[in-house]
Image (cartoon, rainbow, N blue to C red):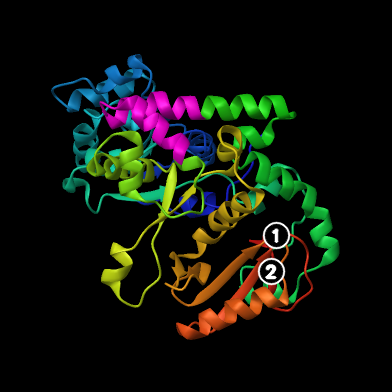
Amino acid sequence: MFYQRKILSSIKARLKDKEIVVITGMRRVGKTTLCQILLDNIKSANKIFLDLENPINQKVFEEKDFDNIIHNFVSLGLKKSEKMYVFLDEIQAAPFAVKAIKYLYDHYDIKFFLTGSSSFYLKNLFPESLSGRKFIFEIFPLDFEEFLIFKNFKNPDFHQDFAEMAKKKSLIEYEKKQKYYEEYLRFGGFPGVVLAQDQETKTLRLNDIFQSYFEKDIRFLGDFREINVLRDFILLLMQRVGSGIEITKISSELGVSRQTIYAFLSFLEKTYFLYLLKPFSRNIDREISGKRKIYLCDTGIINNFAQVSSGSILENAVFLGLKKYGQINYYQKRSGGEIDFILNKKIAFEVKQKGSRVDYKKLSKISDSIGIKEKYLISQEFNQIDYCISASEI
């Protein structure tokens, strides 16, 4: 059974365009499934799906004369006389194919759909000559609304406006969702994990996702000599979710240079494994130079490989929910006061397992001092206070 992702409608809207559709995101987030749904939505029979991690499919593009690739398509059942729809899964496995794709795009009536598991690699893979020839869509693990859809939860009630979330919250709706939200915090949003029927299978699939990421992305794409150090670095970062990264301390602890740590962080961020949150400042230079806080791609991954407080898991989940609304920063005063998240430089959020009026008063004081008028508590427990949003609504 196929479950519809939110991003699907945006990609469907591009089916009639000439541009190449590129779908990128971490492994096991559902890129291949999305392509299969898109394939089924194309009425033409002149279409093909090729997994480029299969060496046999790679041979289709191993031609010095790119025109011969059309003959290879014909041998696979496509008609040269009609518009072709060509889906290529895991394009990073066949980087040599990119020049051919550009040539075929320019000279034939072909609509290409490409998937790749790394923005880091895709940016290096796609030459500037593809500029203006592609639309890029990023796909992530399920947010909680999608999680409920995958759980066949009927008519989940969500609001896109934060003021509405705070004003129209319902204890009945909260209680209906709560057991699902607890599962979401524990096991995360990778589709295959969500659909697993028991905890043992969920755990096995989380293990497999991390192993696949380590073996196929880190070893294949990263080309790092210190592969075991990178493994230890990842495990160390998992323990520090929601905390600032002290580069000098970590480099000393692991016995590698600061430059190596920066390279690790850049790779992990651009392969969608983690996010680095910059501090909020009206001064761009200070924002760029400030200490980053770290959040991971999925709470299930964190719980499966690290011992982290429930408060940190909640904060990570809220971050993942908020990032779809725009740019996120955090704020910390030198005196110690802080704001967990600032969205688009104009809305402040403080995350608590049980928010209170005192928490909101502290948030308001700091927010007012930096010119941010709109602010909300985000609480895991239900709270009827007007300015409080239930975490399960994010």
Q: Secondary structure at mark 2?
A: strand
Where residue 353 is drawn, which disc sits there? 1
Highlighted magenta segment, given as a residue range: 210-236
Q: Residue at x 45, y 82 (%)?
A: 370
Q: Residue at x 73, y 42 (%)?
A: 151
Rendering coords of residue 384 (x, y %)? 79, 73
Identify residue for label 2: 389
Rendering coords of residue 249 (x, y %)? 35, 46
Dot 2 surroundings within 10 Å: few (below 14), some, or many (20 or more)? many
- Dominant SS of magenta comes to helix
- Determine if the magenta segment contains residue 213: yes
Q: Secondary structure at mark 1?
A: loop
Residue type indicated by callout 2: Ile
* Residue found at the very far top of the displayed protein: 56
Whether residue 100 sits left or right of residue 191 in the image: it is left
Q: Nearer the viewer, residue 185 or 41?
A: 185
Asked if 390 appears above or below 127 in the picture, the reply is: below
Whether residue 339 sits left or right of residue 179 in the image: it is left
